[in-house]
Image: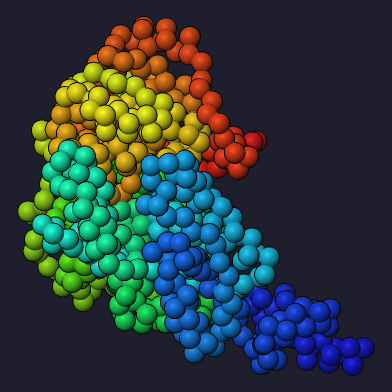
Amino acid sequence: MSDQNNVQDSMHYKDCRSGMLTNGIERAAHRALLYSTGLEERDLHKPLIAIVNSFTEMVPGHFHLRELAQCVAQGVWEAGGVPREFSTIAICDGICQGHKGMSYPLPSRELIADSVEYMIEAHRFDAMVMLPGCDKIVPGMLMGAMRCNIPAIVVPGGPMLPGSCKDHPVMTLTDMRELIGQTQTGKMTVEELMAAEQTALPGVGTCSMLGTANTMSCLAEVLGMSLPGCGLAHAVSAKKRRIAKQSGYRVVKMLKEGLTPRKIMTRDALRNAITVSMAMGASTNSTLHLPAIAHEAGIDLSLKDFDELSRKVPYLCNIKPSGSHPLSDLEAVGGVPAVMKMVEPLLEGSALTCTGKTVAENLKDVAVQENDVIFSLAHPKKPEGGLAVLHGSLAPAGAVVKQAGVKPSMHRFEGKAKVFTSMEDACEAVSDGQITPGTVIVIRYEGPKGGPGMREMHMVTSLIVGRGMDEMCALVTDGRFSGSTRGPAIGHVSPEAAAGGPIAIVQDGDPILIDISNRRLDLLIPQEEIDRRLTQWKPLRKPRTPALDRYSALVSSADQGAILRAPQE
């Protein structure tokens, strides 16, 4: 018996979670599999650290993540861990714009969260460093981190540098898209457009404006899941590589401290993220992703939180697409920590971060800067936050608008509805000159369930803005928008058309009122007529693949974060 005990003792390699793979005589086959990957016996005593990579050659925001993963691995080794890399998918919303492929990015968020859970739980990793980049990959990985609740740090790939072209010294993807409308109306030549394509986006990284990718990368830092300064460290910078290495080192220390995502991403931290998103003029998609992250830990976070904070937190950051500066200018004046310092009186400073320190401790030595990039609380760019939540007879459960990107003349707009059941039809109508001043373009059956997949309507808004029509007409949809959207674009209308929301029964010519200041979105017909139409309503079912069919069957409405619910829920 004592000999057997001696054998067991000699085969007890570690007490952390991954010991399930290595400890005991019955794990001989497991150890053999690990040895076959090149590990030595001394490595079996070390914690097993996942590097969750989303590298792909298809997407500029992820093209460089192999290199960043190597930096993370170096930090893990130096801290005494064993790094092991695996991959998730990564879809580029920009490349998906304007066609059926846009049905897939939002559903991919759940697939990414699931893949993190599958790999982490199946292989009993002790901690992880996650390398996301573009729009849905950041929240998908944060959802997976909240779900698995082992020590985790996020290292987003970082923004690309801004580009330029003739007459446009600072170019981002938003500018590039709006040049299409300018070309269609003869304001620039096809040759000039083609030349701009070559220089608008000069290299790897996420698009150099405050779209969803950079919004969520910044908010990962605000949440406390990235090291300070990580969110806006540019993709091509040495700073990003240093932070990647430091993150690998730090996550091993977090394991020893027992510092897990649910201790960091609390309700206070999530509300801090909303606060900073309002100050920055962030993407409307944050209203989908932050509630979805909260849901993984059973935390109640809803549009009510966004509405409350949008009224309290002023808009401070003069960043494209709502402002005039690229993200490189914000990074130059201090990045996310500088924005957080400016709104520090509005933050919950006791929230814990991956540094092991609180928000207040992290910000202690950050200098307050007031300039043309970051305005002050006393002299904000606009008195209310970048996003606004609207309610009314057209959106009983809510709708979302990026009010920071709407010209003052359009904060109250009444127009006649022109109804479409797909983004493509609306784009064709705009391009063909069918949309007249005073029109409210209504695009329905593009919500999470009805699309399925809640496609972005950004091609429509880009055409409207590029044609100079953003003070003549507006857009209302149960779909969503790119974070790079500007103009009078109201999305996330809930309930969506496929769920029998009032947007399903709007008819051409119906009057619609958009009143951002008073947070209203109303269909100006009698309630009795709305009720009568709804009793006669029959849903439109669009063709769908098996993957999208399953998604449609399980997905909740946009006002609930478009989360997936099991049938019994």
Q: Left or right: where does residue 263 sit relative to residue 333? A: right
Most extreme residue toward the right is 1
**Where does the image place residue 49, in percent across and percent down from the top left?**
57, 77
Looking at this view, is 286 or 547 the one in front?
547
Q: Quadrant of residue 7?
A: bottom right
Here the colouring is: rainbow
Residue 71 in picture, x, y percent from top left = 44, 82
Q: Is residue 102 left or right of residue 377?
A: right
**Looking at the image, can residue 51 be seen?**
yes
Q: Tell me the residue at 32%/41% (across/down).
A: 459
Q: Residue at x 14, y 68 (%)?
A: 368
Q: Quadrant of the C terminus?
A: top right
- Quarter residue 492 falls in: top left
Residue lying at 34% horizontally and 10% vertically, measured from the top left: 527
Position of residue 395 relative to residue 157, above or below, is: above
**x, y percentage for residue 238?**
31, 81
Q: Is residue 529 left or right of residue 130?
A: left
Which residue is at the front of the view, 473 or 169? Answer: 169
Q: Quadrant of residue 519?
A: top left
Q: Is any atom of residue 402 visible in this view? A: no
Relative to 333, is 140 above or below?
Answer: above
Q: Quadrant of the N terminus?
A: bottom right
Instruction: Examine the rendered structure and indicate whether residue 4 appears above or below residue 125.
Output: below
Between 507 and 497, the one nearer to me in the picture:
507
- Residue at x-position 77% and y-position 83%: 32
Where does the image place residue 418, in percent across and percent down from the top left? Answer: 29, 21
Count of numbered badges drawn on the protein:
0
